[in-house]
Image (cartoon, rainbow, N blue to C red):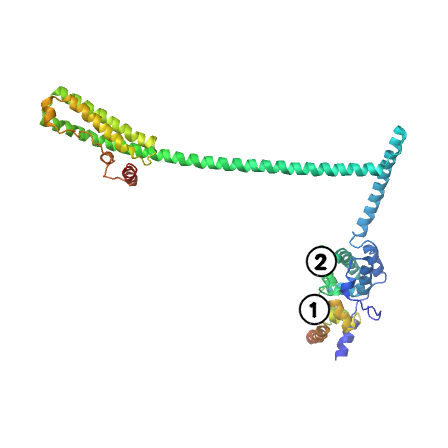
Amino acid sequence: MNQDIEHLIRSAKPIVPAGARARTLESVEPEGAVGSTPAFVRVFLRVAALVLLAVCSGIVAAMLSAPAQSAGEPVDVAAQIADARARLDSLEQTSLTNRIANLQSELSALQAERNSVFERVIKEAIVEHEQQQMAEWRERHIRHVREHQAVEREATIRRMRDELDLTPEQEKEVRALLVSTDKQAEALISGFYTDRHARHDPSMHEKFEKLAEEADTKLTALLDAQQRDQMNEPTGIVSAEPEDWAPSFEFRDGTDVDVYTNWITVTRE
Amino acid sequence: MPGSGNEDNDASLGSASPDGFQDLFERYYDAVFRQIVLLLGRDTAAAEDVAQETWWRIARSLKTFEGRSGFYAWACRIASNEVKRWWGKHKRPTAVGPEPSEDPTDGRDQAELVHAVLRRIPEEFRQPLLLDLWEGYSQREISEALGLPEGTVKSRLFRARERFRELWDELNEQ
């Protein structure tokens, strides 16, 4: 059975055409051409090489003949070519090195510039955000203080009128004094947001204390002796405590909470 | 080459020198050519074209041949790729790949049917079988050509014959 199979397969053995091996060998041309190109390409390359050789021969002949005619001295063309090539290599090397160095320098500059621009943009964005926040906090704080002090001012004047029997002229001067003091307090608060950017400022105590003393002195000056005797000294007409100048406890939203918390925190002693 | 007494190791022949190439060419040209005929069909003119491309690529790539497999196995892979490339450029002839399921009495000759059955045998079994029966290689020569131990060659030859018989019987029963 095995012999039948083997015979069957052997009988189907393809015939290698006569000359196929030689033709293939010719196309591959192994003698010195291992790794070469197909025959038609090689024919083309051979023709191209011949043309190139002819052109080069002409050039070399011209180079050899020209100096001989002009100077009458033998010229070592090969040495000249070698020298020129060496200089060209050196030039290319130097040029390439310089270009790389320049490119690296430009790249570093661009990176530094990019980082700088990026940093500046971030800083500007932070500052802008902070300024907007401070403007909003300041506006809310002052609006509260203004509303609150307007009520407090009238209550103070009414009490003084009743207790000290203020003349209309004195009442007018007291109101002006209180209005002026409130404006100074507003200025202090405003400066706290614009100059200090709501950062910790224990000196706010001294500033309000000074404001209270000045108001007290001016008020005392407006009263006569009898009225001064009736008033305690200092009068305490203006609070010297920053806490009393805090924004409202009646918070409408988170911003009110932030403004209040911040003021209490950063004005602590 | 069978009967030539040349038993050089493939790896030593796998140099890129012209002598090494020529030696390999002389040893394996016919075997590779018949593989191409088998894979391509019975169009020997086309097979010769593919063989030229195959050997040109072998010549170009010989430096990269590391001898991890046998030269013949490596050359057959190149030949197989060239056959696929040829098919890519030409309309696949209907004569290629006659399926064993077809009627064996449909007029095609027996060799064509044998080729069709051989094509259905996996390459690792088919190659030693053909080196044995078509090229007349000894088991040692097959071992060198494929880079396989002789024991493996022996078992593959046995399984290849078995597989051929099964397929051939299948074909004749239809």
The crowd level at tag 2 (other Cα within 10 Å; few <14, some 14-19, many 20+) is few
Q: Nearer the viewer, residue A168 or B117?
A: A168
Image spot of residue B71 (x, y percent):
75, 64
Residue placed most toward the observer, A131 or A105 = A105
Residue at position x 85%, y 59% in the image: A22
Locate residue A21 relative to residue B86 in the image: left or right. right
Asked if residue B71 shows in the view, the reply is yes
Q: Residue A149: x percent and y percent?
A: 21, 30
Q: Quadrant of the N terminus of chain A?
A: bottom right
Q: Which label sits on residue A216?
A: none
Label 2 marks which chain's residue? B
Q: Which residue is mark 2?
A: B87
* Corner quadrant of residue B95: bottom right
Q: Identity of the amino acid at label 1?
A: Glu
Question: Is A133 displayed left or right of B160 in the figure?
Answer: left
> Is A124 or B135 nearer to us in this picture?
A124
SS for callout 1: helix
Q: What is the spatial separation of the Cα atoms under label 2 and label 1, in whole angstroms?
A: 22 Å
Q: Residues within 10 Å of mark 1 (few under 14, many from 20)?
A: some
- Give the residue drawn at x 75%, y 76%: A5
Image quadrant where residue A60 sits: top right
- Relative depth, front residue between A130 and B122: A130
The residue pinned by badge 1 equals: B124
Coordinates of residue A97 in the picture (x, y in percent): 66, 38
**x, y percentage for residue B16?**
78, 57
